[in-house]
Amino acid sequence: MLIFLKCLVAVSILIFIVGLIKPKWILFWMKQPDRLTATSLGLLLFMASWTGIAKLTLKPKPPEHARPSERSVDDQNTLQLDRR
């Protein structure tokens, strides 16, 4: 799956560049293809593939356990104005 997404990144860059030059090659099924649609397709594929790569490779951080405070609630709410 990761290899497929990396290939999709390369294909999306190719679609973006070719869509800027010859949008009819990318959007061959449309009667009047334009550059905006072709490049938008390339950018959407690029973003979707990088999101998939990040979702597959990045590990979520383990939750940090909140350690109980050593001070009382009243002491936590007071400002420490003396810096000693």
Image (cartoon, rainbow, N blue to C red):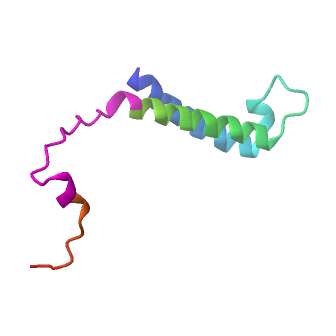
Report if residue 34 lies within the magenta region: no
Q: Position of residue 24 (x, y in %)?
A: 81, 33
Q: Is residue 47 left or right of residue 27?
A: left
- Quarter holding the N terminus? top left
- Quarter holding the C terminus? bottom left
Q: Position of residue 6 (x, y in %)?
A: 44, 31
Compare residues 11 and 62 and report the one nearer the observer.
62
At 9% across and 51% down in the image, what residue appears? 70
Query: How many numbered callouts?
Result: 0
Q: Is residue 56 left or right of residue 42?
A: left
At 25% across and 60% down in the image, what residue appears? 77
Q: Is residue 51 above or below residue 28?
A: below
Q: Quadrant of residue 81?
A: bottom left
Compare residues 10 and 79 and report the one nearer the observer.
79
Q: Is residue 25 left or right of residue 14?
A: right
Main SS, magenta region, reads: loop
At 20% across and 39% down in the image, what residue appears? 64
Q: Which residue range is magenta in the image?
A: 55-75
Q: Is residue 33 left or right of residue 42?
A: right
Q: Residue furthest right?
A: 31
Q: Position of residue 60 (x, y in %)?
A: 29, 33
Report if residue 63 lies within the magenta region: yes
Q: Residue furthest top?
A: 1
Q: Position of residue 21 (x, y in %)?
A: 74, 45
At 46% across and 29% down in the image, what residue appears? 52
Q: Quadrant of residue 36?
A: top right
